[in-house]
Image (tube, rainbow, N blue to C red):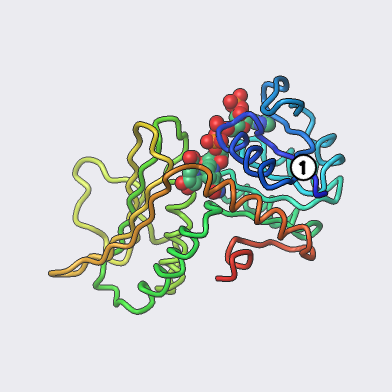
Amino acid sequence: MTKIGLFGAAGRMGRAIAQVATEAGLSISGGTDRAGSGDILPGLAISADPLALAAQSDVLIDFSAPSALSAHLDACVAAKKPILIGTTGLEPAHHALIDAAASVIPVLQTGNTSLGVNLLAALVEQAASRLGDDWDIEILEMHHRHKVDAPSGTALLLGEAAAHGRNISLATQSDRGRDGITGARQPGVIGFAALRGGSVAGDHQVIFAADGERIELGHRAESRAIFARGAVKGASWLLNQPVGRYDMKAVLGL
Ligand SMILES: NC(=O)C1=CN([C@@H]2O[C@H](COP(=O)(O)OP(=O)(O)OC[C@H]3O[C@@H](n4cnc5c(N)ncnc54)[C@H](OP(=O)(O)O)[C@@H]3O)[C@@H](O)[C@H]2O)C=CC1
Ligand SMILES: O=C(O)C1=N[C@H](C(=O)O)C[C@H](O)C1
């Protein structure tokens, strides 16, 4: 039976994944968390040792924090184990670390593991490629009050899809926060806005706005179970892949 190791096991996603995996009859080999102690499921110990966890697992899933990514990748590379990274708030330096690890082990990184969001990204890319740049693109997201990063990883994933469809670079053509006398909208940029409150699992809306009409494409997550199911599916898929970097499109056949 496949043994899944969970980085960030005591967090909201760690617990959701442990539950989904256990219900699916998969085995959780253990977990790490910053606290380094406690149980998330009866009989499942949490340690603070990523290398020991990687050594005792077939595949690792990371839903923790960007500051922990380097140690988690090092552990997986040392143990030669594949890893699925769901942690968001990643900077270019984190992506460089992921690229380096993906030359040694299979790595899947995604801002959203759900089928719905990844299908939405494909639709957004298609819309952006068909609509001229007189259609402004704005991305709005809302999450629960505990979320610490903005824009969400999903908003950035959707922004990358729109940028790809429009053949522009998101890194140079985005507007990630407006406040005060901002001046008129810069032509061609992709705008982001983030709302935080309550227990919202994750709402995303991509708005294409032209003179006289708007198209709105969106997704609402009703619970974390959709992310957990996608993570378990992605990790199982990753076990059979060669060394390289992947996203959820290949897993979901999109
Ligand atoms: N890709 C996707 O589909 C999804 C991605 N996410 C992302 O996953 C991440 C986790 O989300 P969520 O579970 O809600 O957050 P939580 O804060 O509930 O969980 C994160 C856990 O990781 C722990 N952690 C922090 N640093 C380390 C470390 N160095 N080593 C091991 N564990 C550590 C935290 O401990 P402590 O509490 O002590 O800080 C916490 O228990 C976020 O980046 C979120 O945006 C969330 C949902 C879906
Ligand atoms: O922190 C969350 O909760 C979520 N994070 C991911 C993101 O940043 O997009 C995915 C999902 O929206 C929930």
Q: Is residue 150 left or right of residue 248?
A: left
Residue 196 in picture, x, y percent from top left:
35, 36
Q: Percent x, y for residue 126?
A: 40, 75
Residue at 56% x, 53% y is: 113
Q: Quadrant of residue 37?
A: top right
The answer to whether residue 170 is seen in the rendering is yes
Picture residue at 26% right of the left edge, 70% below the top: 135
Closer to us: 86 or 22: 22
Q: Which residue is mark 1?
A: 27
Q: Extreme left residue here?
A: 212
Compare residues 201 and 67 and report the one nearer the observer. Answer: 201
Q: Amino acid at mark 1?
A: Ser
Residue 200 coordinates in the image, percent (x, y): 38, 38
Q: Position of residue 248 (x, y in %)?
A: 59, 61
Foreground: 136 or 114? Answer: 114
Q: Is residue 204 left or right of residue 64?
A: left
| Horizontal relation, residue 153 to residue 68: left or right | left
Describe residue 25's horizontal placement relative to residue 64 as left or right.
right
- Residue pictured at 52% horizontal, 59% vertical: 115
Q: Badge 1: how crowded within 10 Å, few (<14), some, or many (20+)?
A: some
Mark 1 residue element: strand
